Image (tube, grey):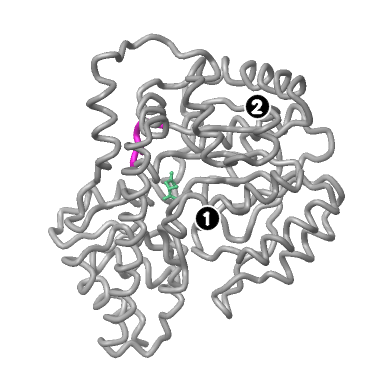
Amino acid sequence: LWKSVPKGPPDAILGISEAFKRDKNPRKVNLGVGAYRDDSGKPVILPSVQKAKSLIIKSSDHEYLPIDGLAKFTQLATSLAYSNASPLKDHRVASIQSISGTGALRLGMAFIQRFYPHSRRVYIPNPTWGNHKTIIQHAGLEFQEYPYYDPVTKGLNIEAFLNEIDSAPKNSVFLLHACAHNPTGVDPSEDQWKQIQDVMARKQHLAVFDMAYQGFASGDVDKDAYAVRLFANEENPIIVMQSFAKNFGLYGERIGNLSVVCDSKQESDRVLSQLKILARPMYSNPPIYGSRIVSEVLGNEELKKQWLVDVKTMADRIISMRNALTTLLKEKGSLHDWSHITKQIGMFAYTGLHPEHCQELMDKHHIYLTMDGRISVAGLNQRNVEYVADAIETVTRF
Ligand code: LMR
């Protein structure tokens, strides 16, 4: 029956984890998927999350959530992104719990596909997270890349980016990474965000924020929400897709939030009703456990304080690994300039390694990374960083 079904390629990111698992070499290192590890290379349950779990255990049943999720969760999650930005104060943000960030993107794109009358096209940064293109296409939309990263300066190409926003047809849809751009680790400065927001407002573009790393860029969740709050306060039309996979370490719990800023409370009620209609045939209603944990943490002053420390601890360890890797590469006599690794922010370093370097790192050194040269810095630790530096120095020597 399925003879004509061709075998598809492995996923560009999650396929790397599969290859890593198959490798039996004890020295192997996984720098592929963006998942935080502690200094012994182990997954982490954040202390704030651990405490929340012990508090909710007795009251937890396994009932269905409503289609739009746990009300306490969507309210706390939305205010984590917007703080007291005016649309939230005016009760005109439609929020729905989502299947992590990917689910928020998928549902948000389905909403745009069905209800956004102005465009079928979503502008995405070049480069961007590997899954964006497919999510957009599967929702029946098309994508177009906008210039973002400059491989020469290894920084942001702000002029070309602003030009593209300006020359795109009025009311276009632009996908923006709210902070800690994946894969490059290159974010606009606050001044540059202001310029971006200005042109977006003038062109009446819709900004779609992928916010998967709040807290990971600067270690401060408010600083990392700068762009979202700026756009919200300036009344730019925005949709925000939040993930709690990274900043709560709740990867497998699939917990996220989708919010659409509307013109009025009535409009947000209508939008939410349609988001529910889109979600119901896709997955009926979202999983409960992660939403209980996040609401317990964000709704409890003590736990929230602890969580802010937890996020900063993760962000700081990543920074120390960026420094260690760069220093070691220099000490090992690498002829290349690796200073961009310490300038970039968030979970990833966009090393500039070419696909043949990446292949050699995997085949000869058992170091796994995506073929675009992105490494998840969170996969480095005191025990493996020298080994990784050695290997990178070796494959880039000539
Ligand atoms: C990543 O970029 O590694 C993460 O967002 C995980 C994923 O699903 O790709």
Instruction: Residue under label 2, please give it.
Output: 94
Q: For the residues carrying marks 2 and 1, which lies nearer the camera in this image?
A: 1
Q: Secondary structure at mark 2?
A: strand
Picture coordinates of residue 389 (x, y %)? 27, 75
Picture coordinates of residue 47 (x, y %)? 25, 41
- Identified at 41% across, 34% down, the residue is 298
Kindly identify the amino acid type of the residue bearing the numbered disc 1: Lys
Query: What number is the disc on residue 210?
Result: none
Q: Is residue 358 above or below residue 277?
A: below
Residue found at the far left of this picture: 26
Kindly identify the amino acid type of the residue bearing the numbered disc 2: Ala
Q: Residues within 10 Å of mark 2 (few under 14, many from 20)?
A: many
Q: Does the beta carbon at disc 1 come under 8 Å from ligand 1? A: no
Picture coordinates of residue 296 (x, y %)? 36, 28
Q: Does the beta carbon at disc 2 come under 8 Å from ligand 1? A: no
Q: Quadrant of residue 290?
A: top left
In the image, the segment drawn in magenta is 249-254
